[in-house]
């Protein structure tokens, strides 16, 4: 059959086989004989490829950024006593067979769309437009590498192909020896094909600098997790050989190439550190900062939120002024993580609720992904990033209450991702101009309606930042042992500049990047594959046991839902369950088999309900 490459429409994917779930419905007459016909067609496909991240965003509990955050030692699942999914993810267990069906589906939608562009890029003559062609192709390679990278970190060995159409059947490939060299090649191709400054910074497109950053992130995970290299600055790392041909790569990848790419991104990518760490986060916006004492000094100096697409952002998921519960991906156009991580709704039994004017600028939401008390306790008060990242709700906002439905809530919330209000918010009618975004939009045009008909639920448009310059600088320090860029990050933070050591760089990554969804896979790569119950990741995760939390309004201690965090990590190596529906469809372990720790005979893999404390 002819494959359809008109990806600007929302393609529908079935799950009958690998071929079927990567195929799109033929809603038009366009086919490989007449499409793509020119750059405009490929740009439509590229827009649809980026749009898959918005499809992912429609179910936040299946996104790589939120899931990896919840699985780390720095976050509790939290939410309400009935929010089974977030608890299951945080406890490295499962609550239902379909828990990650959408994540699997969207991963392969992204891969299929990227393959379509890569395979179709030279369907017409690019004479005189070679730079445009290379940039577009580089972005497609970047996105394919990104979806495979996310897929491998989630599930390990997965079905994989790199042609226009998938084979049928499409069996699992070994992540270490087969898929990861392709991931690294994709990011390297992207880096070599793209040009600095070819796209406008912050326009949502991948850049040469972003490709360098994700090349390093993938390389460090590969060497640390799969090759068990330990301290990367001192390890003797073998070249990654490419036994396949691909535009933009040749022969092998060396550590020196990765380091050089990072240095190019830092020095020539056009990025810079935002001057004050707090300016990275939307609570410093102009409508809010003047009434928020924590940032009163910034407001007095006329310094406000650096905004979406700021000088430090290198790659992000972007949203738009649209959001609705209707339709397949409508809520993917608003940053729902802000809603999920906002102050727990409901009351304390006496009619007191969170998210009113007394809690300004922190809005009401689901209360999921609260900060684990250990992060607060481990972090020095002398580091300004602590208070900039973690909301100590009972201290900073005395009217905060622990609700009768709260679970795993120690009173610590992630300021980086929370819903933000302002003094002009309509606290008495949360469906109106509740978030500061809603107030801002309506100040521009009073005739605008609230997105989703509910400002509290639908008006969250801060980028989901997936890579920023500080991370790139810290990766450079970790790969080289050179303290220069680590010290720049520390200097910006207002903390003492230290010498390089493996301990210091680990700590610096924990503090600088806290609450950004990177910690879990950092722990995995520092531990190495098959690390067992005594590896660094397992030990760090197990420290959650016994940490203080509130449950239905009373102080208690968290405990694992089925066994222990160390045991679950040892059993799974941090991998998720492959959706059981896919296993049944394949009906052949030579094609697709379940990951370790998730079989039917593993009693502690499944939760029967939320933990009761």
Image (cartoon, helix red, strand yellow):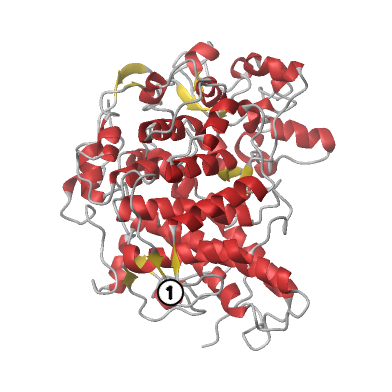
The front one of 233 and 491 is: 233
Number of numbered markers: 1
> Which x, y percent locates residue 596?
22, 56
Can I make out residue 98 in this image? no
Can I make out residue 168 in this image? yes
The front one of 243 and 280 is: 243
The C terminus appears in which quarter of the rendering?
Answer: top left
> Which x, y percent locates residue 420?
63, 28
Q: Residue at x 54, y 14 (%)?
A: 396
Residue of label 1:
161
User: From what the image shows, is residue 600 above or below residue 421?
Assistant: below
Q: Secondary structure beneath disc 1? A: loop
> Which x, y percent locates residue 594?
26, 61
The front one of 539 and 492 is: 492
> Which x, y percent locates residue 392?
48, 18
Q: Is residue 534 left or right of residue 450?
A: left
């Amino acid at each position: 059959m002819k494959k359809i490459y008109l990806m600007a429409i929302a393609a529908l994917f079935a799950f009958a086989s690998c071929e079927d779930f990567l195929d799109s419905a033929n809603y038009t007459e366009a086919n490989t004989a007449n499409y793509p016909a020119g750059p405009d067609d490929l740009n439509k496909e590229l827009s649809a490829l980026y749009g898959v991240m918005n499809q992912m965003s429609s179910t936040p509990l299946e996104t790589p950024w939120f899931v990896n955050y919840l699985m780390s030692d720095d976050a509790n699942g939290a939410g309400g006593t009935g929010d089974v999914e977030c608890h299951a993810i945080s406890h490295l267990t499962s609550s239902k067979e379909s828990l990650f069906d959408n994540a699997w589906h969207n991963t392969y939608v992204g891969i299929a769309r990227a393959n379509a562009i890569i395979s179709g890029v030279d369907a017409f003559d690019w004479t005189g437009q070679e730079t445009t062609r290379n940039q577009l192709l580089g972005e497609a390679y970047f996105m394919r590498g990104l979806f495979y990278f996310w897929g491998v970190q989630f599930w390990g060995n997965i079905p994989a192909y790199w042609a226009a159409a998938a084979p049928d059947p499409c069996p699992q490939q070994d992540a270490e020896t087969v898929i990861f060299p392709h991931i690294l090649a994709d990011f390297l191709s992207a880096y070599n094909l793209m040009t600095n400054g070819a796209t406008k910074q912050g326009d949502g497109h991948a850049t040469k600098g972003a490709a360098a950053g994700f090349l390093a992130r993938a390389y460090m995970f590969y060497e640390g997790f799969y090759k068990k290299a330990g301290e990367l600055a001192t390890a003797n790392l073998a070249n990654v050989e490419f036994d396949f041909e691909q535009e933009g790569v040749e022969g092998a990848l060396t550590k020196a190439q990765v380091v050089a790419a990072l240095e190019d991104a830092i020095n020539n990518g056009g990025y810079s550190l935002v001057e004050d760490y707090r300016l990275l986060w939307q609570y410093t916006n102009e409508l809010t900062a003047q009434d928020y004492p924590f940032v009163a000094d910034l407001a007095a100096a006329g310094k406000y939120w650096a905004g979406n697409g700021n000088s430090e952002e290198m790659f992000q998921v972007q949203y738009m002024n649209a959001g609705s519960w209707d339709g397949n991906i409508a809520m993917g156009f608003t940053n729902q993580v802000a809603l999920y991580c906002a102050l727990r709704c409901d009351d304390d039994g006496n009619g007191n609720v969170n998210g009113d004017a007394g809690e300004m600028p922190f809005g009401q939401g689901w209360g999921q992904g609260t900060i684990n008390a250990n992060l607060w306790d481990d972090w020095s008060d002398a580091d300004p990033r602590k208070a900039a990242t973690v909301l100590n709700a009972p201290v900073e906002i005395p009217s905060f209450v622990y609700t009768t439905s709260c679970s795993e809530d120690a009173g610590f919330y992630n300021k980086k991702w929370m819903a933000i209000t302002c003094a002009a918010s309509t606290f008495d009618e949360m469906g109106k101009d509740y978030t500061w975004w809603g107030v801002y939009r309506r100040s521009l045009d009073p005739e605008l309606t609230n997105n989703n008909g509910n400002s509290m639920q639908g008006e969250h448009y801060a980028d989901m930042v997936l890579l920023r310059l500080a991370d790139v600088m810290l990766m450079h320090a970790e790969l080289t042992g050179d303290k220069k860029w680590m010290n720049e990050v520390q200097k910006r933070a207002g903390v003492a500049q230290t010498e390089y050591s493996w301990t210091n760089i680990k700590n610096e990554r924990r503090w600088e990047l806290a609450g950004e969804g990177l910690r879990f896979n950092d722990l995995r790569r520092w531990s190495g594959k098959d690390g067992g119950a005594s590896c660094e990741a397992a030990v760090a995760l197990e420290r959650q046991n016994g940490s203080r939390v509130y449950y239905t309004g009373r102080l208690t201690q968290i405990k694992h839902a089925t066994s222990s965090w160390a045991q679950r990590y040892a059993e799974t190596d941090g991998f998720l369950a492959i959706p059981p529906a896919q296993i049944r469809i394949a009906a052949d372990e030579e094609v697709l088999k379940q990951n370790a720790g998730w079989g039917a005979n593993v009693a502690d893999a499944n939760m029967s309900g939320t933990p009761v404390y």
